[in-house]
Amino acid sequence: MNTNIRKVFEAFASEGTMSGYSAIDSGHINATYLIETEKGPSFVLQRINHRVFTNPEDVVANKIKVSKHLFEKLRDRPDFGKETHVLNFLKTTSGGYIHRDEDGSYWNLMEYIENSRVYLKTPDRGIALEAGRAFGSFLALTVDLDPSKVIETLPGFHSMKLRFEQFDEALLNASSERKQSASAQISIANELRQEMTSLENLVGEGKIPTRVTHNDTKISNALFSEEGQALCVIDLDTVMEGVVHYDFGDAVRTICSSADEDEPDPAKIDFSLDYFAAFVDGFLGRSGLSLSKLEIEGLPKSAKMMTFIVGLRFLTDFLNNDIYFDTQYEEQNLARAKSQFRRVELIEENLGEMTNIVMNVSVRVQNKSGTVAK
Ligand code: GN1
Ligand code: MG
């Protein structure tokens, strides 16, 4: 698509004249561009993939709702605008936060947070801790936002049952070549089928409270300062009602490994308990997040479950001939699935230690606050 980025940018009521732009390639669904202006601030322009997000207006409404809520909670803090930021969306010249271009594509624009950087992989334990603090704080700050007021833009997004239904359907339609190349991963998925639905059952029984969750807490969705402080959680496309385990588990998937998301060689994939301990310290110990006993107990296992569900989705997309996630090379979705399933194995091996870490940190937090998790 040969989009006129300047024209799209000018549809928004921002100050400044565009001097250049570049694509930010880390996402798998939407297209994102960094817009530079002659003298003023930079911006982030995003085209919402409306094949995936069939109601882009709802996606943007959720992003605005959550950002406004965060802004209200943080605006009076002394570190606001320095070490703490909230995404700031711009309106179009005709009002509203979405621009629809001539091709029918949907766009939204945010201010770029100056002097910030992202990591695709965790470089050290300090970043793991700060990432934990950022994603934990996000949940602590949105705890008073009624989840039913946030629109379910992608129904069943983290539903294991739905993801297995989609996998089963993909298996029925897949080519024999693709099934053959993915045969080991197909077996792993089938073996884990029962175990992986246990959290969903607890949620269904109402035993775990729902809340507003981010739902895509990979390391690249937090911004950091050059000094390594977490500044802001970004990519609010999937904010919806969920449970703490979605955000905790998905974060562990990327934060506790220094391998690429699509690293196909199992020998090159690690799981760092050291990063995990730092992440838990940030998430539970330094974020102000308060959880029930049942929520805390489910955290270690949620890392396995969320890593698995993402792997299952990559595998399903591979079987479907790569129709959902962007791919840069043949078999990338299979490589991504292999890599996630290897992480699942490593998490299983480390589950005992992970449980000790979670329990130790949660006891420390309770002792400090004088409350006991119920
Ligand atoms: C997708 O588009 P991106 O990169 O922010 C996906 C997430 C996956 C992630 C895996 C709407 O996120 O669910 O966890 O890829 N988003 C959607 O990297 O499906
Ligand atoms: Mg995302």
Image: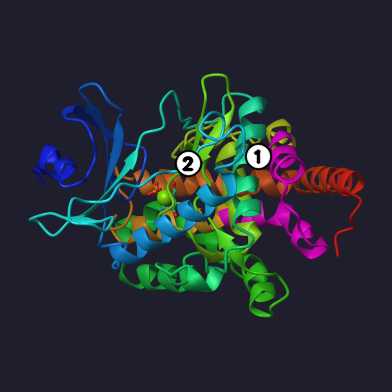
> In this rendering, does residue 363 appear at all?
yes
Specify the amino acid type for callout 1.
Arg
In the image, is residue 274 above or below residue 343? above
Q: Is residue 286 magenta?
A: yes
Quadrant assignment for the C terminus = bottom right
The image shows residue 246, relative to residue 47, as above or below, that is: below
- Badge 2 marks a residue whose secondary structure is helix
Residue type for callout 2:
Asn
231 and 330: which is toward the camera: 231
Q: Position of residue 184 (x, y in %)?
A: 49, 54
Is residue 175 among what the camera can see? no
Residue in the picture at 60% in, 32% down:
79
Q: Which residue is mark 1?
A: 133
Which contiguous range is marked in magenta?
278-306
Residue 342 drawn in magenta: no
Q: In this rendering, would 100 be left or right of 163?
A: left
What kind of colouring is applied to the model shown?
rainbow
Q: CA distance from mark 2 to mark 1?
A: 13 Å
Q: Main secondary structure of the magenta part?
A: helix
Q: Position of residue 299 (x, y in %)?
A: 72, 55
Residue in the picture at 21% in, 46% down:
12
Q: Residue furthest bottom?
A: 205
Task: Check residue 221 in the rendering and tell me which mark sits there, or answer none.
Answer: 2
Task: Give the residue drawn at x 51%, y 48%.
Answer: 71
Q: Earlier in the sequence, mark 2 or mark 1?
A: 1
